[in-house]
Amino acid sequence: MTGTITNIKIAPYSFTSTTGTFNNRFTLVYSTNLNSPSQNLNTNTTLVHKIDGTFYISSQEKLISNVSIFDLTGRLLYQINNINATIINISELSKIKQVLLFKIIYQDQQFINVKVIN
């Protein structure tokens, strides 16, 4: 709800809230590699998260060149090339709840794969 990102691998997270049900308070962001990207690439420097139906991809160290998004069957759902930016927004994806695989390729041709629950 606040738009902050907390890495719970580094430190625990706590918060206070009013009484009630908040179905959209938290979003889990997965950054597990699915293939064998370059061993020199730090996956903690690229984040993929979703807010209000829009996916945000941000890279702290490298320019993003291409992004491909697949479903679990390997079907290509979305692709954008020649990005040349460190931050992009993608709002064109379906609202269907599913696991998505993001392949993010940087300008130096290194890449990471990120699994995200939509």
Image (cartoon, rainbow, N blue to C red):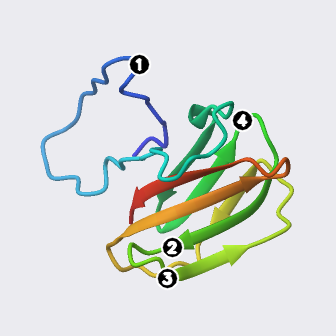
Question: Tag 3: residue type?
Answer: Arg
- In this view, the residue in front, 83 or 89, is 83
Q: Are marks 4 and 3 in contact (CB under 8 Å)?
A: no
The residue at 76%/34% (across/down) is 61
Determine which residue is flagged by label 2: 70
Question: Which numbered disc covers residue 60?
Answer: 4
Q: CA distance from mark 3 to mark 1?
A: 34 Å
Q: Are marks 1 and 4 in contact (CB under 8 Å)?
A: no
The residue at 35%/80% (across/down) is 96
Mark before the other along the chain sequence, 4 or 2:
4
Q: Are marks 3 and 2 in contact (CB under 8 Å)?
A: yes
Determine which residue is flagged by label 3: 75
Mark before the other along the chain sequence, 3 or 2:
2
Residue 66: % across, % down = 75, 63
Mark before the other along the chain sequence, 1 or 4:
1
Q: CA distance from mark 4 to mark 2?
A: 23 Å
